[in-house]
């Protein structure tokens, strides 16, 4: 039997000069007729509303496919206002009260601290903020403080001393590097245990954009700035694992990926082509494959259940551990009062080992390393494991073939690739 949804409010209002019935249902749907049947879901489509004299203006977003005649594009969202006029002051007051109660019940943020990295990717983060982010935040009546980053680790230093009680979340209009800085800054604080609970958002404006690509792809939405900031406005959240990395005496934290070998070389050495934006990765990757280096070494790991057949049995040794540099930034020294990592006795774990030579070693926390690189198709945001992808020494033609499948995760089917989940 179909569920019966009770009306929260039903009244006659004036729309475009015509009097019509308008209903707000108990599941948060606004319905009315203005020559056409209209319907808006408050949770997904309504950003906010404003009172203009005797009228109420609903600020909303609609699917671009529904607005093709107005210039919308399929797969995009389009801003649109809907105006109605209650027939009395009491009715207007009641409509405002019901709309506000519904919107407040969604747990949306009211105050945000926003980092904008003007140097990332094609250096268009400031334009993305002004064109795509700011208008939607204003429509949603969200207050915000904007800080442009001026140098590497700027965001980390700010977050370490930021009064987090003033904000409901931190948003990075950038690539993944600023997000990594923010996470490390939060974990360097004395109150790290509370600080790390602050919701973090990302708007794609960098070279890679792997984190927001992973988040939006999970819910079937395109990786666009408007979709990303709408997820923030709606208060949508997911738990995310944080990996603690040791490199000599340095300790830092990763939420996206680490790389060693070919992938790391491409990411780091292509910096001189940053003016090319994301195209620099493909351009330099071609050069590095044509003049392929050999990467000798060994990787020791603790397999997740079901992956115990990979590698050979081993014992723990600090010299045996692969010490990759995070692809988004250099190692960060963390003060003793910050988070020191999980309390794990590494020596008593069931270690296994895979010896090189390798082409690349990847350690992934989320599926996408960039907007066109699904390095770890089975990665989960909060399963307590990292996905380890090892590309073994292989012929250049086979390497070209498997790397050409990175955009859909098909590389993991190659016989030259080992793909497993690990806890350490």
Image (tube, rainbow, N blue to C red):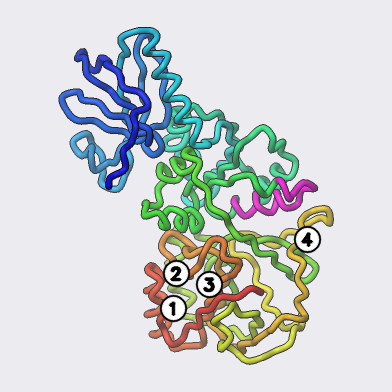
Q: Counting residues from the N terminus, which is met first, the one under dot 4 or under dot 2?
A: 4
Above or below residue 380? Residue 41 is: above
Instruction: Residue at 42% x, 19% y: name it.
Output: 96
Asked if residue 181 lies in the magenta stretch, the reply is yes
Residue 285 has which mark? Answer: none
Q: CA distance from mark 1 to mark 4?
A: 33 Å
Q: Counting residues from the N terminus, which is met first, the one under dot 1 or under dot 4?
A: 4
Magenta segment boundaries in residue numbering: 179-194
Front tag of 3 and 4: 4
The residue pinned by badge 4 equals: 340
Instruction: Residue at 37% x, 27% y: name it.
Output: 8
Name the dominant secondary structure of the magenta segment.
Answer: helix
Q: Is residue 225 visible?
A: yes
Answer yes or no: do the residues labelled 3 and 1 have beta carbons within 8 Å? Answer: no
Residue 412 has which mark? Answer: 1
Asked if residue 163 lies in the magenta stretch, the reply is no
The residue pinned by badge 3 equals: 263
């Amino acid at each position: 039997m179909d569920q019966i949804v009770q009306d929260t409010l039903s009244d006659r209002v004036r729309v475009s000069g015509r009097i019509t019935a308008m209903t707000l249902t108990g599941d948060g749907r606004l319905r009315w007729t203005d020559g056409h049947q209209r319907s808006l879901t408050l949770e997904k489509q309504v950003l906010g509303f404003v009172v203009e004299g005797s009228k109420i203006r609903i600020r909303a977003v609609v699917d671009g496919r529904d607005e093709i005649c107005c210039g919308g594009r399929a797969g995009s969202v389009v801003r649109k206002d809907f105006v109605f006029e209650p027939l009395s002051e009491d009715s207007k007051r009641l409509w405002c009260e019901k709309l506000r109660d519904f919107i407040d019940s969604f747990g949306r943020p009211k105050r945000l601290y926003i980092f904008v990295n003007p140097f990332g990717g094609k250096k268009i983060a400031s334009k993305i903020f002004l064109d795509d982010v700011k208008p939607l935040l204003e429509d949603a009546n969200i207050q915000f403080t904007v800080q442009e980053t001026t140098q590497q680790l700027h965001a980390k230093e700010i977050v370490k001393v930021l009064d987090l009680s003033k904000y409901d979340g931190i948003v990075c209009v950038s690539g993944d590097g600023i997000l990594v800085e923010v996470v490390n800054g939060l974990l360097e604080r004395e109150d790290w245990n509370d600080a790390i609970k602050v919701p973090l958002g990302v708007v794609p404006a960098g070279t890679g954009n792997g984190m927001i690509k992973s988040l939006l792809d999970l819910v079937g939405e395109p990786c666009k700035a408007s979709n990303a900031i709408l997820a923030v406005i709606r208060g949508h959240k997911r738990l995310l694992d944080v990996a603690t990395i040791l490199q000599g005496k340095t300790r830092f934290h990763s939420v996206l990926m680490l790389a060693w070998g070919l992938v790391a070389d491409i990411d780091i050495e292509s910096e001189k082509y940053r003016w090319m934006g994301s195209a620099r990765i493909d351009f330099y990757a071609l050069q590095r494959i044509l003049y392929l280096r050999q990467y000798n070494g060994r990787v020791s790991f603790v397999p997740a259940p079901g992956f115990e057949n990979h590698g050979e049995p081993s014992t723990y040794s600090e010299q045996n551990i692969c010490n990759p540099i995070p692809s988004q930034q250099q190692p960060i020294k963390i003060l003793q009062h910050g988070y020191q990592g999980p309390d794990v006795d590494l020596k008593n774990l069931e270690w296994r080992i895979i010896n090189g030579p390798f082409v690349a070693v990847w350690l992934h926390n989320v599926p996408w390393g960039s907007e066109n690189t699904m390095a770890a198709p089975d990665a989960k945001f909060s399963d307590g494991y990292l996905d380890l992808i090892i590309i073994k020494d292989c012929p250049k033609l086979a390497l070209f073939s498997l790397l050409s499948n990175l955009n859909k995760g098909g590389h993991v089917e190659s016989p030259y690739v080992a793909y497993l989940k690990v806890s350490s």
